[in-house]
């Protein structure tokens, strides 16, 4: 709500600023036109005085926003006209470059034209412009054309230009602030989801250890060897599980602080895949699923860390099992690539939409589920996978569609 109100306020300020800038420009343009008309009236009076013309004041007409024409009774001397125009424009503080043209009605052509430069700053703007329109009235006339009129008026709107620049900085700062706020909001949601997940993950082994230890402390349990061993094993197994969970969190902390060191050695990638698959088969079988391997890479030896590569494959297989709404069907394949090997893991799980795919490799990221905890984990698995693949100078590509499963393609260099 706060962001919406702030956005509406900024938009209101922008609209108001544009309205008043437009009003200020129109006012400046009207003032400029009045000064030009006043200057041209004075020029025509001086010309009539020189030529001893006692007729009525010639007609002054504005054909376009920057083109003025003045009707005359006869042709004019161009340099006389130019000197009058320069003198009258300078009197009225019109220091903008202009062109003047003298037309002859007898042969319907321009007798003379010239560019007068009163302001060097607008020279570049004048180099390319359209030819002023012809006046359709009969008779002699001269025209004055201001090719850089709009730029000249904008330069005269100093306070408005300054305020617009300040507003632009405010908008940029506002956009940056909103981006930070939205990121912080997203991080807060991820943090809360991580805390909920961690609480559920730790609660089960702690509860099991607590119950088992209480049973061991009962007086009659000492003589029941089988039960004592059962509860002791439960405590042992859950302690190992707790240790694994804690180590996983600490491992992420080490990765974040760049403390992880790879123990690189020559490895048979197919052998690493085979051992990991053997260890995961029981879990897949319990779900009623199956896992297939299609290892076609001819050059299967790579230089990497066996522990981390095993963990990479384990994490991807574990996700394929956890995020499956039916019997998991998993396929692992390898193929040769330039200077390396491509390892692909494909599943028939629930898949991911485009928005989820953008964040799936982020640390602690999980699809927000509130207090529902149907899939265990901290949201660290794929972050770990991507980080370790990058440490091996490789890369990972995800292809997924909702309801159609996912495929992870991992490129690992041989050296």
Image (spheres, rainbow, N blue to C red):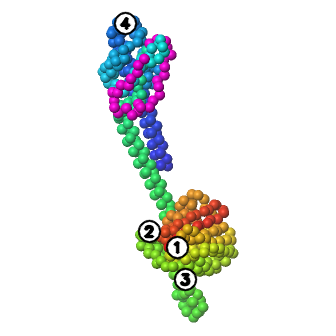
Check disc 2 and report its element: helix, strand or loop: helix
Q: Gap between marks 1 and 3, in whole Å?
A: 38 Å
The crowd level at tag 2 (other Cα within 10 Å; few <14, some 14-19, many 20+) is few
Q: Which one is nearer the viewer's eye here, 72 or 394?
A: 72
Between residue 229 and residue 176, name the one nearer to us. Answer: 176
The verdict on residue 385 being magenta is no
* Residue sitting nearer the eye, 291 or 196: 291
Query: At numbered mark 4, what does the secondary structure look like: helix, strand or loop?
Result: loop
Q: Which residue is drawn at 53% across and 66% down?
A: 395
Residue pictured at 44% horizontal, 75% vertical: 261
Q: Earlier in the sequence, mark 4 or mark 3?
A: 4
Mark number displayed over residue 414: 1
Q: Distance between the residues labelled 4 and 1?
A: 98 Å
Asked whether the beta carbons under mark 1 and mark 3 sit within 8 Å of each other, the answer is no
Q: Residue 205 carries which label?
A: none
Which residue shows up at 57% across the image and 68% down it? Answer: 337
Q: Earlier in the sequence, mark 2 or mark 1?
A: 2
**Residue 357, how many percent across, how many down?**
57, 61
Q: Mark 4 points at which residue?
A: 53
Start-end of magenta stretch: 111-140
- The mark closer to the camera, 2 or 4, is 4
Tell me which numbered mark, 4 or 1, is placed earlier along the sequence: 4
Q: Mark 3 points at which residue?
A: 237
Q: How far, Cα to Cα, is label 2 from label 4? A: 91 Å
């Amino acid at each position: 709500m706060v962001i919406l109100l702030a956005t509406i306020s900024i938009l209101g300020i922008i609209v108001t600023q544009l309205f008043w800038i437009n009003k200020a420009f129109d006012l400046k343009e009207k003032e400029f036109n009045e000064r030009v008309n006043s200057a041209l009236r004075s020029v025509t009076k001086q010309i009539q005085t020189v030529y001893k013309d006692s007729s009525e004041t010639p007609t002054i007409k504005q054909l376009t926003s920057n083109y003025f024409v003045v009707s005359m009774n006869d042709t004019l001397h161009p340099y006389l006209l130019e000197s009058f125009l320069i003198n009258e424009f300078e009197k009225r503080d019109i220091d903008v470059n202009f062109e003047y043209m003298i037309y002859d009605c007898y042969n319907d052509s321009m007798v003379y034209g010239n560019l007068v430069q009163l302001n060097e700053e607008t020279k570049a703007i004048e180099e390319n412009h359209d030819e002023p329109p012809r006046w359709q009235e009969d008779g002699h006339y001269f025209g004055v054309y201001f090719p850089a009129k709009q730029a000249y008026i904008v330069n005269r709107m100093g306070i408005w230009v300054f305020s617009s620049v300040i507003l632009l900085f405010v908008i940029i700062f506002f956009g940056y602030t909103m981006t930070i706020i939205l990121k912080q909001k997203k991080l807060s949601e991820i943090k809360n989801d991580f805390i909920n997940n961690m609480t559920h993950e730790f609660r089960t082994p702690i509860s099991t250890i607590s119950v088992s230890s209480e049973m061991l402390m009962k007086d009659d349990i000492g003589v029941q060897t089988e039960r004592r061993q059962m509860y002791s094993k439960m405590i042992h197994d859950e302690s190992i599980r707790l240790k694994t969970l804690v180590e996983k969190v600490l491992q992420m902390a080490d990765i974040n602080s760049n403390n992880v060191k790879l123990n690189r050695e020559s490895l048979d990638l197919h052998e690493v895949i085979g051992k990991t698959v053997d260890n995961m088969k029981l879990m897949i079988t319990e779900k009623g699923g199956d896992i297939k391997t299609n290892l076609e890479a001819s050059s299967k030896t790579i230089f990497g860390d066996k522990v981390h590569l095993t963990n990479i494959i384990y994490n991807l297989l574990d996700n394929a099992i956890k995020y499956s709404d039916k019997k998991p069907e998993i396929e692992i394949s390898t193929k040769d690539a330039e200077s390396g090997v491509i390892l692909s893991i494909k599943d028939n799980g629930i898949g991911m939409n485009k928005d989820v795919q953008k964040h799936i490799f982020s640390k602690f990221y999980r699809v927000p589920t509130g207090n529902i905890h149907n899939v265990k984990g901290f949201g660290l698995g794929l972050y770990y996978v991507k980080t370790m693949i990058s440490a091996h100078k490789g890369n990972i590509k995800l292809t997924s569609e909702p309801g159609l499963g996912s495929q992870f393609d991992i490129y690992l260099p041989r050296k």
